[in-house]
Amino acid sequence: MTPPPAVTAAILVIGDEILSGRTKDKNIGTIADYLTAIGVDLREVRVVPDEADAIVEAVNALRARNTYLFTTGGIGPTHDDITADCVAAAFGVGIDVDPRAKAMLLERHKPEDLNEARLRMARIPDGADLVPNPISKAPGFRLGNVFVMAGVPAIMQAMLDQIGPTLETGAKVISETIEAGNLPEGTYAGDLAAIAKAETAVSIGSYPSMTPTGFANRIVVRGRDAVSVARARDAVIALVERLRGGTGA
């Protein structure tokens, strides 16, 4: 049976503050975990400054080669919040204050407090669907296969929870972890490559980490076909067990 086509995604993080290091991104990992759990492959992540040309180019490039594109950041009330305008430009559509979005803002703000700056958060590209924001009310939106979300982690999470049930999903990835302990990667790299070459339906990675007693290595086997994953896992376990008594560099 031919497996269903993969459902893929990209993330576009927008903001000078991320690139400068002033703000530490917390959204990439959250989105990656969420997508993996529902069977969507996160293929790439890009970070761009608050510059219109860079945002438009990235939106068009990433949406063209993925099932979905998720953007974070740049939809607030200040002059440098230009994500909505850039997404509209990428799609070649107009943008203006959306009555639906304005009504959402009025759930939080009095009419007399809904000044020009706050109304910027109600500017939505033509033809977009709104993504509710139960925390601060200013909505995100979906246009085509692009989901535009806030950069504030708690608000982004709330928006993602709204978006999740609407997504097409694929087969979930099965992951098996084999503890290689203090075996040096150099002792098993060649054999691991041979296993990976034989089991083309899975991906195999080796991940060292530093512990109080020194390096410890983990080998992770991932794939969607349970039989292939199990066969590769067993081969890796056999390799590790064979090498545990030996030495290497």
Image (cartoon, helix red, strand yellow):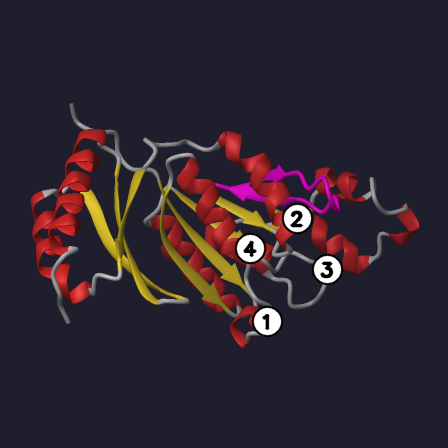
Residue in the picture at 55% in, 74% down: 21
Q: What kind of element bears circle 3?
A: loop
Residue segment shown in magenta: 129-144
Q: What kind of element bears circle 2?
A: helix
Instruction: State the residue position of label 2.
Output: 155
Percent of width and height locating residue 218? 29, 54
Give the CA separation, mark 1 to mark 4: 12 Å
Amino acid type, callout 3: Pro
Instruction: State the residue position of label 3.
Output: 77
Instruction: State the residue position of label 4.
Output: 72
Instruction: State the residue position of label 1.
Output: 17
Q: Is residue 38 left or right of residue 102?
A: left
Q: Residues within 10 Å of mark 3 (few under 14, many from 20)?
A: some
Q: Quadrant of residue 226?
A: top left
Sequence order check: which comes first, mark 4 or mark 3?
A: 4
| Labelled pair 1, 3 in contact (Cβ < 8 Å) | no
Amino acid type, callout 1: Glu
